[in-house]
Structure formats: C-alpha cells, structure tokens
Image (cartoon, coloured by chain):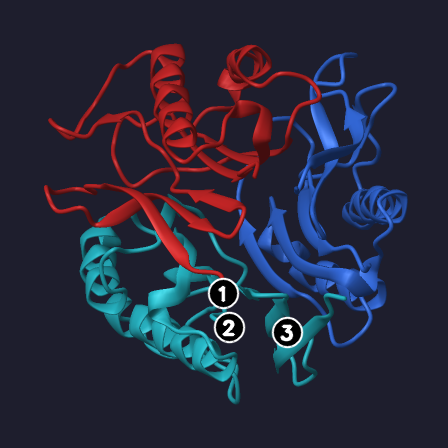
Chain colours: A blue, B red, C cyan
C-alpha cells in the first residue's frame, strides 16, 4: 500500500509548520513552492535576483537530499518570476544546477504574496529505489 | 495495466461537461482547478473572499470523497489568488481544512478568465489502497 | 526500479537543449510548458491567438506520440493565457483536441518571459502499458 510520507515542514507567515516542505508518495516527491525567505526571521534573504534564486535552489537541493532524491532525479520544475528581465539569470542558474539531460520546465511571470519576492520555484522529483 | 479513470465532469463557460473534475491514474488523483462558480447558474458564488474560498474547498472535498481520497491524502495544493491581501484568510482556511502534517503548497498571485473570481485551487492527491 | 527517461530536448532562448520536452517516470509523462515559438528561429510563430495555440497543441501532440502516449491519455492540462479575452477560443481548441471524457484543467491569466507570447500549455499524461 502506498502511504503519504511527509519529509519536512515549513512555517509560512508565522512560526507554525503550516505546510510541508516535501511529501513523498511511492517513488514520487512533491516539493512546496520555495521562496527566498529566511524561515527563522521570515524575511526576504536579499534584494538581488541571483541571491534570491540561489537561496531557493539551495533549499530545494537540501529537501531533495533529505528525501533520497537529487537534481539528476528532478522531473519537473515550475518557475514563477516577478520580472521577465530576470529570465537570462534564471536560465544560467538552471543550467548550472540541473545536469543534462535536464528536467521539463515551465517559466511564467506572476506576482507573489510577500513583497520583495522575485522568484518562487516548485519541483516534482523521482526517488530512485 | 494502469488505466485513466474519470471521476466526474464539469461545465466550463457552458452546459457541456467540457472538463473533468477529477481524473485517477493508478493511485494518483488529479483535480481540475476549482473556481468559486455555481456550476448550474455559472455565476460567481459571492463577492466575499472567504465565501469564495470555502466554496472552492467544499467542491474539492466532495471530489476527493467521490474518488475515495480525502484531505489527509492530499499531496500538493496550488493556490492562485487575485489579491495578495487575501493571503492571511487563505492561510486560516488552509490550516482548518488540511490536518497536520499538511500537504506541500504553492501560492501565487495571478488573474483569472472570469471577472469577479478571487481564488482558484488545484489539488493533487493520493488514493489509499 | 523506476528510471527517469528523457524523451526529447528543447532549446530555450538559445541553441543548446536547455530543457527536456518530455520526461517519463514509470507510466507518468511530464511535458515542459510549450510556447508558440519556432525552435529553429526562436521567433513567435504568429501574432494570432488561434495560430499560436494550434502551434502549441501540435508540439504537445508530437511529444505525446513520441513517448507512446496521446490526447486520450492526458491527465492534466495547465493553461496560461495573457488575455482573458482568448478564453472562448481556447475552449474551442480544447474541445476539438481532447476527446471526452476530457482531462482535468486549470486556466489562469499571467504574463510570459518572451514578448508576443499569448499562451503557454503544460501537460501531464499517462503512458498506457
């Protein structure tokens, strides 16, 4: 029987672990959309796009490792940008983070719930057996 | 052999069942993005955010139950808000709907195809065997 | 053991195959968000919504066929529109592309990274065994 397994939890706008950082279902791993926010101070980590994006990637790589997955097992990445002008910087970070052949990806331009956020990234991965 | 099973159907801007409310694939359940729209009159249920969000949650819980799943088996929730100012109300409804440890979640701020919509929610769930 | 299988690759803002067009994991198939862009010239295929949308659907159908799937096996479709005024044209194309009972669907209104884009579509499908 497949069982839902919560890998970690995150505060969202408060100190309670309001969402899970990652949930496993069989050999599939679903990560929450990760934001460039320090989960202790609940503040944006930087006003710089690349520093924000690197923080998000670092959180994602940590969650993948915690669940027994990794960047080479990522299936899908959904990226939300505030400013289309950050697309080239995002492509550069993407190419250095995920080894070829890379995951599938969707990048759209939206707004966010927390002022100052420039990027949010959501990942779906496989867990090798 | 895994087979695609449609759990229910929904009209979209008309009376034909243009989309499925939920589709099962093995032990995974995919729900359509649910909107605060009365599927008989095709009108927005309320101008109030919390009433709209509760209507969406009620539809989701009904689809989960119909498919043999439930809020404790939800893996991922993607929430689209028109107004970032509704984030606290969304967090409160979220916390009371999904028991801890909660699903993974992404919340972004976008626009919608139907005027008056303040929220849309898309769910991916597991179906326990 | 389930293994990640890349079905095809796509350039994104350049000539390198920066993302995969589709990735298979077991009997699940994840497609990249597809844009109305000619992958040789990297230019928007048309200024007309229906021509853009048809180009995106054609790319998706080709990727599904390449992976041993097809429109009748599509589980979820996420559609991003620049202009809510294109919703009716999208519904018409949707109805003629996916046979009933149709997949689950979410349609929201966002912006894009490349000027002139009016639509982007992301698909999750099953692969029948």
Q: In this view, does A50 lie above or below B86?
A: below
- Are the residues at dot 1 and dot 2 in contact (C-beta closer than 8 Å)? yes
Q: Which secondary structure, mark 2?
A: loop
Count of marks, rendered view? 3
**C-alpha distance separating marks 1 and 3:** 26 Å
- Nearest the camera: C32 or B82? C32
Q: Distance between the residues labelled 1 and 2?
A: 6 Å
**Pair 1/3: label in front:** 1
Q: Which mark is residue C129?
A: 2
Q: Where is residue C95 in the image (x, y as percent from the top left)?
A: 20, 61
**Residue C20 has which mark?**
3
Q: Residue at x 72, y 53 (%)?
A: A27
Say few, some or many: other residues with alpha carbon within 10 Å of mark 3 (under 14 / 14 to 19 / 20 or more). many
Residue B66 against residue A52 in the figure, above or below? above
Disc 2: CA contacts within 10 A as few (<14), some (14-19) or many (>=20): few
Residue at mark 1: B1
Going from the N terminus, do you reach mark 2 or mark 3 first?
3
The residue lying toward the viewer, choosing from B94 and C19, is B94
Residue C95 appears left or right of A101: left
Residue at image location 20% in from the left, 67% down from the top: C96
Q: Distance between the residues labelled 2 and 3?
A: 22 Å
Assess whether mark 3 and mark 2 are in contact (beta carbons under 8 angstroms).
no
Within 10 angstroms of label 1, few (less than 14), some, or many (20 or more) residues?
A: few
Of the residues tagged 2 and 3, which is closer to the observer?
2
């Amino acid at each position: 029987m497949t069982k839902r397994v919560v890998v970690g939890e995150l505060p969202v706008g408060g100190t309670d672990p309001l969402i899970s950082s990652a949930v496993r279902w069989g050999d599939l791993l679903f990560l929450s959309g990760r934001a460039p926010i320090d989960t202790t101070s609940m503040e944006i980590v930087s006003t710089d796009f690349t520093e924000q994006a690197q923080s998000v990637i670092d959180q994602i790589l940590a969650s993948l490792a915690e669940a027994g997955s990794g960047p080479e097992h990522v299936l899908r990445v959904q990226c939300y940008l505030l400013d289309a002008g950050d697309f080239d910087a995002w492509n550069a970070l993407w190419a250095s983070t995920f080894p070829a052949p890379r995951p599938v990806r969707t990048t759209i331009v939206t707004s966010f719930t927390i002022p100052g956020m420039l990027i949010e990234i959501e990942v779906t991965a496989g867990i090798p057996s």
